[in-house]
Amino acid sequence: MDHARPLVIDPTGRDIHGEAARIRARGPAALVELPDGVAAWAVGSPDLLRRLLTDPRVSKNPRLHWQRWIDGEVSPQWPLFTWVAVQSMFTAYGTDHKRLRRLVAKAFTARRTAALQPRVEEITKTLLDGVEETARRSEVVDLREEFCYPLPIQVISELLGVPEELGAELRAVVDGVFHTSASPEEVTDIYQRFYAVLGELVAFKRRSPGDDLTSALISARDDEDASRLSEQELLDTLMLVIGAGHETTVNLIDNAIHLLLTHPDQLAHVRSGRVGWQDVVEEALRVEAPVASLPLRYAVEDLVLSEFGGPEGVVIAKGEAILASYAAAGRDPGRYGADADAFDVTRADKEHLAFGHGVHYCLGAPLGRLEAYTALPALFDRFPGLRLAVPAEELLPVDSFISNGHRSLPVRLS
């Protein structure tokens, strides 16, 4: 095998775990080719990735530290353009990141998240009523469409105070951002539509502010310098919260259901009380990272990987891009043993990087866990005979190498 040539990443994500294994086979960091021939270093070693994610010599700001962006070589029609072009805490670096995260954290409080639990339970019950009603009309129910998807999108929409008339368009544009094999025309269309609908949301909330996250972000001020989010930072922060706040949770719930239905012995552990739902959720996050690979980070200076515990002789040069390969890291045999690919809710070591690590650790992780801890027991308690309606090998992945889930999850309730 020629490891000198970059491993070409399939933009459709048809074989995420096979590709992750090929990344690991090339070492802790492997040179890969993203859509449109963009080169990056995919880091699939959990230990190396954890060290890089916390090192100040690794940035998420392309305007400062990605040579390709600085040289004007990144097209607005690139399928990953939105992931790197936004101006929010997602792409900020150093003191700028601290400022933006402080502003967002003031609105995304633990109190606001905890207060959502009764509403999450209510939404879950209503959706399961709908699942049961659908099953009366049709024996097969698509759980991704009827349950996994609407729960997080409804929760995040209510958290943000999204008016009902904008909901359908928000869902469509979020799906488009995760569509990593989109055509140039599709990329341009989604980019324009996303900002249009976010602009409508902000205008609505300025006219009619409420006790919601959008209103809080509009009014938030930094305690240190009294600064507020700029208009671009506000729109891009909303884009981040909407995208990260629902797609990851959709995939988490989807994957956890699929794993339990295809591993009845593991479901039996839960039902017997040997393990709890927290064990299911953490093991699902490890073995099926909802975000398989997250673009992008950049080397602020030459990174000699041996200094990070990596291989000798490998250097990520200043200005080169880095891809966090969470799917590869979650199944690393060096960390989790020879059965790293296996879904085992009794596994002692379930630690993972699915929500990131370091200063960019996902602020919405507690909410995602809350939704999964609520949704999964409610579903399996209500429908104890739940089973897949098609062979597992017939399920198709979503059309993305970033988002790790299924296009549909057809089930029978008994």
Image: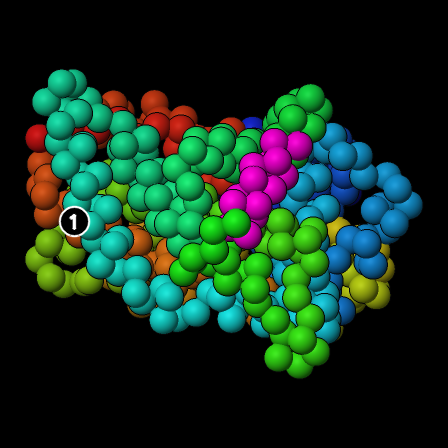
Q: Is residue 304 above or below residue 255?
A: below
Q: Amino acid at mark 1?
A: Ala
108 or 309, nearer to the observer: 108
Q: Residue furthest right?
A: 71
**Left or right: where does residue 324 sit relative to residue 34?**
left
Q: Which residue is depicted at the point 40% across and 54% down?
A: 159
Queried whether the magenta region covers residue 327, the answer comes back as no
Outermost residue to the front:
207
Is residue 110 something one can see in this rendering? yes
Nearer to us in this view, 2 or 275 = 275
**Left or right of 180 on screen, residue 36:** right
Magenta-drawn segment: 192-206
According to the picture, the residue beneath numbered tag 1 turns out to be 378
Tell me if residue 26 can be seen.
Answer: no
Q: Residue furthest top?
A: 138
* Whole-percent x, y for residue 364 in the image: 45, 60
Q: Main secondary structure of the magenta part?
A: helix
Q: Residue at x 62, y 54 (%)?
A: 234
**Residue 252 drawn at (x, y percent):** 37, 48
Q: Position of residue 65 (x, y in %)?
A: 82, 58
